[in-house]
């Protein structure tokens, strides 16, 4: 129960930070995707199911406020959560390389998917520009934020793990 | 034994691939539904609005405050250096100022001729504050702190600083989403003020980093449109009120077909530093379909 509450709280906090606070710290108009960090972190820490749930909820929030089509971001983030969940078997809390790599790849694939579905379909072919102008800076900024955000998510997860072990 | 049903006593769990399938189906269903109807949109917009918007309002105010403070600290240092340089500039600027004042008289006269001010004043307007921006770095839309309860509905025009910002594309009880004209998915029917020729103004993510948006399909048969000309919303647009300033022609080129022109427009609004906007509550008059 506590886990679910903390999950919903984290989703809300990340979404709010992403849409309000980080706009003031946007670099060249690029804002880091905290929701992707959260989705991917829940994926490889807790497995496919929770990754998917977090992704779905984060995506749905984005959809309600900013999506043209309901369910578009929800679908992409659900899959990101699912794929990251596949890596939960080789995840160790002490190892920082795997999470960083997974979050970079998640953010890059999110960017490429958005480009293909939102821009390429409308005849904007200059992939190189969008890659270097939007996708790559977003991924880099996201990684910088990950370095601060990920340990917090990990700590919360470890706390909850210990609590559950005690009560079990 | 089926993978879904487990032995008695064990907790009922769903294998993750089935959950993935279910969530995928829900998403696709939502997408299909939101193409055709907006059954889901209203309750979702309402419930999410009440949970998230109050936080967004608070955070955006706090964030603004923080950003202002850091800005101030940095500025103090810069200001000291600038002060010396500025004093030197004052002399040259005083001279320039007199020249500008002359220009201003001319501008006011021209404005009076165009009667632009008069037309803006006639519309009812509501002020609103921007509380969050699109986090996906692809489109430029933002959320304002007024919604249906303040009488806002979809397709209302939004202006700021005398220029067009965009229009409302979604509403909740206490919030509304504004899609700006610089957003890559926005297209506006516009016209030039000098000749009244129609053109299409489209937002462009690629050009926005240079501070311009694109226009196309300008039939300039008289060859009168030049750089610096005003572009306003056209009378035939079905979403935008006529004669709202969009921006000024930045560059203009012939298309390959030698019939139409296209180029770039500098928007009249500073989208980087937008914090308050005006929503025009007067709607564009639309011709109702006979069968509706």
Image (cartoon, rainbow, N blue to C red):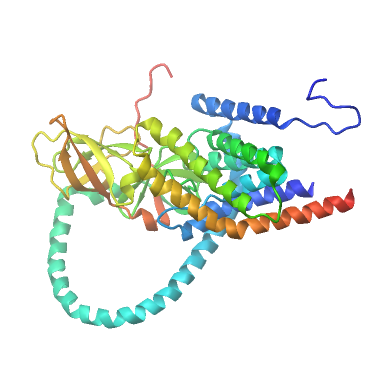
Numbered label tally:
0
Would residue B99 appear left or right of B90 to someone viewing this image?
Answer: left
Whether residue A147 is situated above or below residue B135 in the rendered picture:
below
Q: Residue B77's x, y, as percent?
A: 40, 79
Depth check: give the residue in front, B44 or A23: A23
Residue drawn at (32%, 53%), measured in percent from left and top? B269
Whether residue B271 is situated above or below residue B10 in the rendered picture:
below
Whether residue B166 is visible, yes or no, is no
Would residue B256 appear left or right of A28 to someone viewing this image?
Answer: left
Would residue A118 appear left or right of A92 to someone viewing this image?
Answer: left
Q: Residue B177's x, y, as percent?
A: 47, 43
- Outermost left residue: B222
Residue drawn at (67%, 54%), measured in percent from left and top? A95
Q: Residue B222's x, y, as percent?
A: 8, 36
Residue drawn at (48%, 36%), measured in percent from left and top? A113
- Outermost right residue: B9
């Amino acid at each position: 129960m506590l886990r679910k509450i903390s999950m919903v709280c984290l989703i809300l906090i990340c979404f709010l930070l992403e849409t309000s606070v980080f706009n003031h710290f946007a670099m060249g108009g690029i804002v880091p995707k905290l929701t992707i960090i959260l989705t991917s972190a829940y994926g490889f820490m807790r497995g496919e199911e929770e990754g998917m749930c977090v992704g779905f909820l984060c995506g749905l929030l984005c959809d309600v406020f900013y999506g043209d089509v309901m369910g578009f971001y929800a679908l992409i983030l659900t899959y990101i959560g699912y794929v990251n969940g596949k890596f939960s078997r080789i995840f160790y809390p002490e190892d920082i390389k795997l999470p960083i790599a997974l979050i970079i790849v998640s953010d890059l694939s999110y960017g490429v998917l958005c480009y293909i579905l939102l821009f390429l379909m409308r005849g904007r072919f200059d992939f190189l520009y969008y890659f270097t102008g939007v996708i790559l800076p977003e991924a880099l900024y996201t990684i910088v934020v990950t370095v601060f955000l990920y340990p917090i998510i990990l700590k919360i997860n470890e706390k909850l793990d210990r609590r559950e072990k005690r009560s079990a | 034994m089926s993978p879904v049903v487990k032995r008695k006593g064990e907790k009922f769990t769903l294998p993750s691939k089935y959950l993935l399938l279910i969530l995928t189906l829900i998403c696709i269903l939502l997408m299909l539904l939101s193409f055709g109807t907006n059954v889901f949109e209203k309750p979702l917009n309402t419930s999410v609005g009440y949970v998230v918007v109050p936080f967004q309002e608070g955070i955006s105010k706090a964030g603004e405050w923080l950003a202002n403070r850091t800005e101030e600290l940095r500025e103090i240092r810069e200001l000291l250096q600038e002060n010396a340089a500025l004093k030197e500039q004052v002399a040259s600027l005083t001279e320039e100022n007199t020249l500008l004042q002359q220009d201003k008289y001319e501008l006011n006269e021209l404005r009076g001729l165009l009667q632009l001010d008069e037309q803006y004043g006639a519309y009812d307007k509501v002020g609103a504050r921007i509380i969050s921006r699109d986090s996906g770095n692809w489109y430029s839309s933002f959320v304002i702190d007024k919604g249906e309860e303040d009488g806002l509905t979809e397709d209302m025009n939004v202006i700021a600083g005398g220029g067009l910002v965009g229009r409302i594309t979604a509403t909740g009880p206490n919030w509304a989403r504004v899609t700006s004209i610089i957003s890559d998915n926005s297209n506006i029917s516009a016209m030039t003020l000098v000749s009244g020729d129609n053109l299409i103004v489209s937002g462009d993510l690629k050009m926005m980093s240079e501070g311009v948006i694109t226009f196309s399909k300008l039939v300039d048969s008289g060859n009168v449109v030049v750089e610096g000309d005003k572009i306003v919303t056209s009378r035939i647009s079905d979403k935008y009120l006529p004669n709202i300033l969009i921006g000024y022609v930045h560059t203009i080129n012939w298309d390959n077909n030698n019939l139409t022109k296209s180029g770039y427009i500098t928007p009249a609004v500073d989208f980087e530093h937008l914090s308050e906007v005006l929503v025009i509550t007067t709607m564009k008059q639309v011709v109702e379909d006979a069968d509706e």
